[in-house]
Image (tube, grey):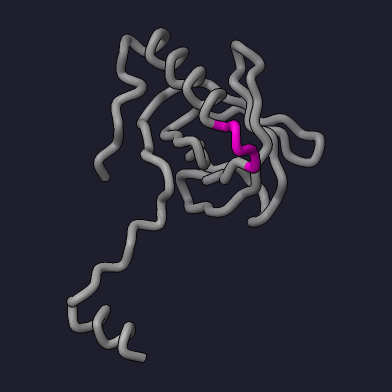
C-alpha cells in the first residue's frame, strides 16, 4: 500500500511502458488477417510493434502478419490497440528488430530521408 501512496504523492514516477524506442516512418505495408490482405501505411515502428494507418477492421487480440509491400519482409503479431485512425500491432518475434531496421532503411530511401528519426513523444 505504501507504493501506491508514493505514486499518488508524486514521490515515484510510473515507468514508461514502452521497451523500445519508436521511430516515425512512412511506407506502404500489407496486413494479413484471417486470409484477407489489406493495404495500409506504416506510421511509426519499434522493435516491439507498429502503428498502422488507416485503422484496419480487426478484433483486439487477432493474430496478423504485417508485410512490407516492396521487399516482402514480414512479421507476425497481435493486435493490441485501435482507435479511429490507427491499428497497433505487437510483434511476436524476438528478432523483430532486424526486420524493423530494414523497414526503416527502406522508408528513409523512399521518403527522402524522413523515416528513421526517433520519436520523442
How many numbered badges does the structure rendering display? 0
Task: Give the quadrant of residue 73.
Answer: top right
Percent x, y for residue 3? Answer: 32, 83
Residue lying furthest left: 10
Taking depth in this image into account, of 41 and 68 the one nearest to the observer is 68
Secondary structure mostly seen in magenta is loop
Say whether residue 34 is left or right of residue 79: right
Quadrant location of the C terminus? top left
Is the residue 60 above or below the residue 118 in the image? below
Q: Is residue 62 magenta?
A: no
Residue lying furthest front: 2
Percent x, y for residue 106? Answer: 47, 13
Percent x, y for residue 8? Answer: 24, 82
Say whether residue 9 is left or right of residue 16: left
Is the residue 8 above or below the residue 16 in the image? below
Taking depth in this image into account, of 54 and 44 the one nearest to the observer is 44
Is the residue 84 above or below the residue 6 in the image? above
Taking depth in this image into account, of 82 and 91 the one nearest to the observer is 91
Quadrant location of the N terminus? bottom left
Q: Residue at x 52, y 40 (%)?
A: 49
Q: Residue at x 32, y 9 (%)?
A: 112
Say whether residue 112 is left or right of residue 105: left
Q: Which stretch appears magenta?
A: 92-96
Percent x, y for residue 88? Answer: 52, 46
Q: Residue at x 18, y 76 (%)?
A: 11
Q: Residue at x 45, y 34 (%)?
A: 45
Amino acid at each position: 500500500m505504501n507504493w501506491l501512496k508514493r505514486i499518488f504523492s508524486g514521490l515515484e514516477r510510473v515507468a514508461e511502458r514502452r521497451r523500445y524506442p519508436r521511430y516515425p516512418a512512412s511506407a506502404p505495408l500489407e496486413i494479413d488477417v484471417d486470409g484477407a490482405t489489406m493495404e495500409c501505411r506504416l506510421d511509426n515502428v519499434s522493435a516491439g510493434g507498429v502503428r498502422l494507418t488507416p485503422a484496419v477492421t480487426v478484433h483486439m487480440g487477432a493474430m496478423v502478419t504485417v508485410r512490407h509491400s516492396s521487399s516482402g519482409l514480414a512479421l507476425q503479431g497481435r493486435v493490441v490497440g485501435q482507435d479511429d485512425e490507427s491499428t497497433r500491432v505487437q510483434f511476436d518475434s524476438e528478432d523483430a528488430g532486424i526486420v524493423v531496421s530494414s523497414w526503416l532503411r527502406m522508408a528513409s530511401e523512399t521518403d527522402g530521408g524522413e523515416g528513421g528519426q526517433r520519436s520523442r513523444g
